Image (cartoon, rainbow, N blue to C red):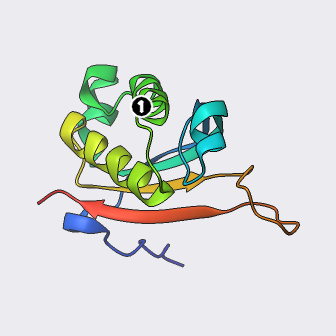
Amino acid sequence: MATRQPAATPHGVRDRIVLTGITAIGHHGVFEHEKRNGQPFVVDVVLYTDTRTAEASDDVADTAHYGVLAERVTDVIASGPYNLIEKLAGELASMVLAEFDVAAVDITVHKPQAPIEVAFGDVSIQIHRERA
């Protein structure tokens, strides 16, 4: 029985690099105490990229270096402040597309300590951006 190929993703790329749970303190939110005190933000990143060159060379220079990616994501979380996690997600996606050789990126920003007056597990935004 033949294995089924996954559907082509942006620009025909089927390969993904996934980095989840990048956590840093940010000062984002609509309330002054959020900007003043800060709180943890958790980011998940999916890079759509062709990994065949890195596979053949076995050289980190031929791929999107996820160690560097994690550092850059924490830099962006610590920047700002922004009122909305939508803005933070957009800034993260723009950084990835500007600094890494990828066809597209999915960004999820979690704000687990959002000031919501009812019990909740998480609030997040997910965006998808493609290279123009």
Q: Position of residue 65 (x, y in %)?
A: 37, 27
User: Horizontal placement of 54 versus 87: left or right?
Assistant: left
Q: Position of residue 131 (x, y in %)?
A: 17, 56
Q: Residue at x 44, y 34 (%)?
A: 73
Q: Residue at x 59, y 44 (%)?
A: 32
Q: Secondary structure at mark 1?
A: loop
Residue extending furthest left? 132
> Relative to residue 29, is residue 77 depicted above or below?
above
Q: Amino acid at mark 1?
A: Ser
User: In the image shown, does 42 or 63 lie closer to the viewer?
Assistant: 42
Q: Residue at x 37, y 45 (%)?
A: 92
* Quadrant in which residue 127 is drawn: bottom left
Q: Which residue carries the number 1 mark?
A: 79
Quadrant in the picture for the C terminus: bottom left
User: In the image shown, does 56 or 123 lie closer to the viewer?
Assistant: 123
Q: Position of residue 41 (x, y in %)?
A: 61, 42
User: Horizontal placement of 50 versus 27: left or right?
Assistant: left
From where the camera sits, is residue 74 visible? yes
Q: Residue at x 42, y 31 (%)?
A: 79
* Quadrant in which residue 114 is drawn: bottom right
> Relative to residue 126, is residue 115 depicted above or below?
above
